[in-house]
Image (cartoon, helix red, strand yellow):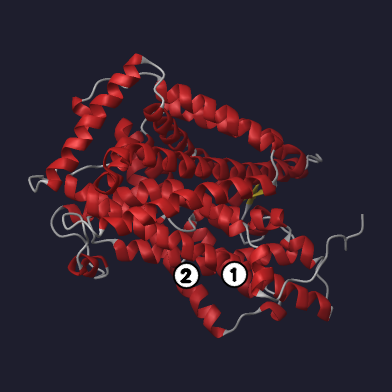
Amino acid sequence: MSDNAGIREAPKTFTGILKELGPGLIVTGSIVGSGELIATTLTGAKAGFWLMWLIIIGCVIKVFAQLEIGKFTISTSRTSLQGLSMIPGPKAMGVHWFVWMWLITFVIAWGQFGGIVAAVGQAFSISAPITEQGRIYNEAADVLVSQKIAMVSEGTAVVAESAPSSVLPDPGPDVAIWAFMIAILTSYLLYKGSYKLIEKIVVGLVASFTLLAIANFFMLQLNATWAISWAEIGKGLSFNLPPGDSGKASLYTALATFGIIGVGAGELIFYPYWCLEKGYAKYIGPKDDSEEWGIRAKGWMRVMRWDAWLSMVVYTFSTVVFYLLGATVLHRAGLVPEGNELIRTLSSMFEPVFGQYAVGLFLVGSIFVLYSTFLVGMGSNALVFADVVEIFSRHRGGSLSRHKVRPWVGMALPLLSFSMLLLFPEPTTLILLAGASLTLLLPVLAFSAVYFRYKFSDSRLHSGILWDIGLWISSVALFGVGMWLVLTVLVPRLAGLF
């Protein structure tokens, strides 16, 4: 087949560009689940309105680094790991140190997907309990959460310090049973699926629940008890920490959330793979010195920028909505979304508006968004892990291709996630630990984005001084937060495990 197969010019009209979007929307499917629905609402529940500014910055600031890494990938047709293996540093067994680093964080962060499949299992077990034990548990959790919401509506609630799990019966095996069936379904989809199938599933699932959450938020403002005041919005944009002893703990939670929300370390690596799957690099064609290549490359870079920035607007807006719902409903009611009550507690955000229908609506929506996160996460990690297999194979004289390995890796990873659920059944802790561990990669990725810009970027593709300023701000922020989290959150937590 010719190297020029598939080459075509980038669209120039807005309608044409919209038709070529997709990678950012797929990544948004990953972001909205564990990041927005769980980690962001948890931060709002613990900190109230005070940390909204940090949540917004966490969504917006990373896009410059995301696009610089993506630009390198689609202009060279190299995968993320192939490109990151070009930054300075030693090799072990012929394999670049960053590949080894990714494998280490992959193992540490793998519990995140055990946490997500557990959360999806919780949603299914609430909507369709399998055992009598599960039904009894659901009824008890429903009563306890509803009582706290009612207390706020009546003006008698006091913020509680403890989670409700201490007074609830054992939930039984329902969550594990449902999670296993979900893992089997995902294994099948990733083995048989294609880019277009994943894109359609994810966009449909995420759009449905996001619109429902936004409608719930605006309808909440019509209720005087739950409406947000301008003074509370002012707190959220004041660049201050929560007052009192809870401020430091809330900041730890928020900065761990910073590693997950928006384009986190994982998405910075995943996004270029999805751009390759979409075909951006193929459309540009092999790099050469011709004017035609430069024009094509600039055109598809423009498409990629639209893709990244529009998806940023979507997930930033939805992130703020989820954060405010957590601060408005959960914080005021003293509810913290943790443990086996995670999904039922989150559903209480819909109760002031939808009443008795809240749980059902939220369950449907949470199944949509959490499953999209699980599907995209498994698909993304399958792309990267298959690339790792190819890299190791190549350095050992083998010829395994990531394209041939990926379906088998995609089939195996969901089942491995289910095994993590069995070993560590507490989903919130797993998700936050994963967010903290992924910050190991943030300083490296921050450096890599700048390194790609000044070492490998084609002069025909430079975006000007304002872009460079944004890239430096993005990279410095990622580096600083990453190092701070590694030293103050990740190291102490890992030390506590031993």
User: Tag 2, which secondary structure?
Assistant: helix
> Seen from this angle, which residue lies furthest top?
132
Asked if the residue under mark 1 is in contact with the one under mark 2, i.e. CB atoms within 8 Å, the reply is no
Residue 355 falls left or right of residue 59: left
Could you say where residue 247 lies in the image, as x and y percent from the top left?
20, 56
In the image, what residue occupies the spot 32% across and 39% down? Answer: 357
In the image, what residue occupies the spot 58% across and 52% down? Answer: 26
Q: Amino acid at mark 2?
A: Ser
Q: Residues within 10 Å of mark 1 (few under 14, many from 20)?
A: some
Between disc 2 and disc 1, whose residue precedes?
1
Residue 480 falls left or right of residue 460: left
In the image, what residue occupies the spot 59% across and 30% down? Answer: 185
Kindly tell me whether residue 46 is visible in this rendering.
no
User: Tag 1, which secondary structure?
Assistant: helix
Relative to the observer, which residue lies in front, 268 or 301?
Answer: 301
Relative to the observer, which residue lies in front, 284 or 37?
Answer: 37
User: Where does label 1 land, which residue?
Assistant: 306
Q: Looking at the image, is 282 positioned above or below residue 161?
A: below
| Badge nearest the viewer, 2 or 1 | 1
Residue 474 marker: 2
